[in-house]
Image: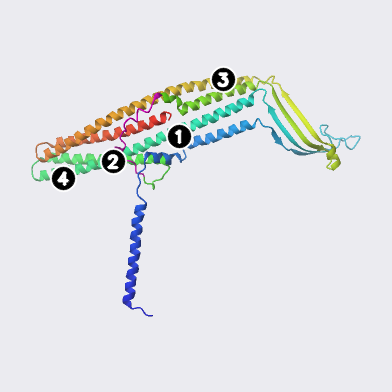
């Protein structure tokens, strides 16, 4: 069957249309399926906690402490071993019989040993029990340290997050200010062209625009630095886009500060960690004292020790051997006394650090609480001031267009509006950072 040229062209057009339609649909649905999502503070914290950090190191320390506890428990159990040895001795040089050996400590020319030995220590001095208690305390300290590290890391991540949110808000407002300055410069240019104002007013409008350009460039640099600061916690590279929440959506909620109390400082994980370390230091003192007391150990062996590998000899020399060792420390150059004094000093140092940390946590709580309360009042004041500043700016522009106000009134109104807007952004960021410190500084 032969196809006409017209049919071939028509079929080609249809195929091309189908391909273009599929591409358009793919692009549209591809754009819909991968929106630019806003990263919330909670999402940022979850991403940060999975990265290599001080918090992850604390988790490893916790696992190490758990293994130490297993080893301390295993010390109470008997140890089972199956040593196998072969001793070959030489005959005595002037021996009267061939079975006389050179080394008197050996039993024969050939000594074959094969047995199963059960050995252990009877804790009459309390050293094993003190070691077990110490391991438990250190595991508790490691768990509390992990929680303390997590809280500190979450606080630092949230602070970096809101620093970026503040930088973004400043950059966006700087762009708006620049656009307003350019528009004002254009209005001034028209008025100057109509010979309604002096040339000095035009120069002031241009200077105002240059000032806004400088502010915009500074805000862009600050935003770039804040982005990289947050990336350190998130563990992302420059190809991962970061879009944070608008600061104006992070205004204070009613009654959220009242839920924080100074009484909860006593349950802070850092204090729990130091208390556990103080208990561990007390157990170190017990271990040092136990080293100066008698020690008792045992070993039970069952097997054979023979001079020939034949059935009769092995059967004859098969049996059990029980050994009990009692050791009484007499003199060690005052080493154990020095260890005891060292452990007592560690105990005193731990108590001192615990007391100091309690005062520092209390100071941090009241400082953060004051910051949050102050920031809340600043937000209310800045919101009211912003309404007045926006109204003042609109009136100044209208008066300037009508020839009723000088150019200085407009530039002053714009500077006042900028100051009020920046004060609002800064107050919101300070409030959120202080709130994060309150959350992490008090127990749930």
Could you tell me residue 314's position as x and y percent? 83, 40
131 relative to 431 in the view: left or right = right
Which label is found at residue 150?
A: 1
Q: Secondary structure at mark 2?
A: helix
Which label is found at residue 186?
A: 4
Gap between marks 2 and 3 measured at Cα: 58 Å
Pointer 3: what residue? 344
Q: Quadrant of residue 344?
A: top right
Pointer 2: what residue? 171
Q: Quadrant of residue 190?
A: top left
228 relative to 50 in the view: left or right = left
Image: 280 above or below 88: above
Image: 152 above or below 339: below
Binning the other alpha carbons within 10 Å of mark 3 as few (below 14), some (14 to 19) or many (20 upward) gives some
Name the N-terminal-most of marks 1 and 3: 1
Binning the other alpha carbons within 10 Å of mark 2 as few (below 14), some (14 to 19) or many (20 upward) gives many
Q: Residue furthest left?
A: 195
Q: Quadrant of the C terminus?
A: top left
Q: Which residues are magenta?
A: 242-262
126 and 200: which one is in front? 126
The answer to whether residue 411 shows anywhere in this view is no
């Amino acid at each position: 069957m032969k196809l006409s040229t017209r049919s071939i062209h028509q079929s080609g057009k249809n195929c091309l249309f189908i391909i273009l339609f599929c591409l358009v649909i793919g692009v549209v649905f591809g754009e819909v399926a991968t929106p630019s999502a806003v990263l919330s503070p909670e999402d940022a914290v979850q991403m940060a906690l999975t990265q290599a950090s001080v918090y992850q190191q604390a988790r490893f320390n916790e696992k190490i402490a758990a293994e130490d506890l297993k080893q301390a428990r295993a010390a109470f159990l008997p140890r089972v071993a199956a040593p196998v040895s072969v001793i070959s001795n030489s005959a005595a040089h002037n021996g009267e019989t061939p079975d006389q050996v050179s080394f008197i400590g050996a039993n024969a020319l050939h000594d074959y040993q094969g047995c199963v030995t059960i050995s252990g220590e009877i804790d009459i001095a309390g050293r094993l029990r003190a070691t077990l208690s110490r391991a438990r305390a250190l595991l508790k300290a490691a768990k509390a340290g992990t929680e303390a590290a997590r809280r500190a890391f979450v606080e630092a991540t949230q602070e970096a997050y809101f620093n970026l949110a503040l930088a973004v808000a400043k950059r966006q407002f700087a762009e708006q200010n620049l656009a307003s300055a350019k528009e004002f410069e254009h209005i001034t240019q028209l008025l100057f062209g109509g010979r309604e104002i002096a040339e000095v007013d035009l120069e002031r409008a241009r200077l105002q625009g240059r000032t806004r350009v400088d502010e915009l460039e500074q805000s862009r640099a600050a935003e770039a630095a804040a982005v990289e600061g947050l990336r350190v916690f998130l563990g992302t590279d420059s190809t991962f886009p970061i879009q944070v929440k608008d600061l104006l959506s992070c205004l204070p909620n009613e009654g959220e500060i009242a839920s924080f109390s100074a009484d909860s400082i006593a349950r802070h994980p850092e204090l729990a960690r130091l208390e556990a370390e103080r208990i561990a230091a007390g157990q170190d003192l017990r271990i040092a004292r136990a080293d100066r007391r008698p020690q008792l150990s045992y070993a039970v062996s069952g097997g054979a020790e023979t001079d020939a590998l034949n059935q009769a000899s092995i059967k004859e020399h098969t049996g059990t051997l029980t050994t009990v060792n009692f050791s009484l420390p007499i003199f060690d150059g005052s080493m154990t006394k020095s260890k005891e004094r060292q452990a007592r000093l560690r105990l005193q140092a731990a108590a001192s650090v615990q007391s100091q940390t309690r005062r520092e946590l209390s100071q941090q709580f009241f400082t953060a609480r004051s910051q949050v309360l102050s920031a809340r009042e600043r937000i209310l004041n800045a919101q009211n001031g912003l309404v007045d500043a926006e109204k003042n700016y609109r009136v100044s522009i209208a008066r300037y267009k009508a020839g009723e106000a000088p150019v200085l009134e407009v530039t002053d109104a714009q500077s006042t509006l900028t100051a009020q807007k920046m004060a609002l952004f800064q107050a919101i960021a300070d409030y959120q950072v202080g709130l994060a410190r309150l959350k992490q500084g008090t127990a749930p």
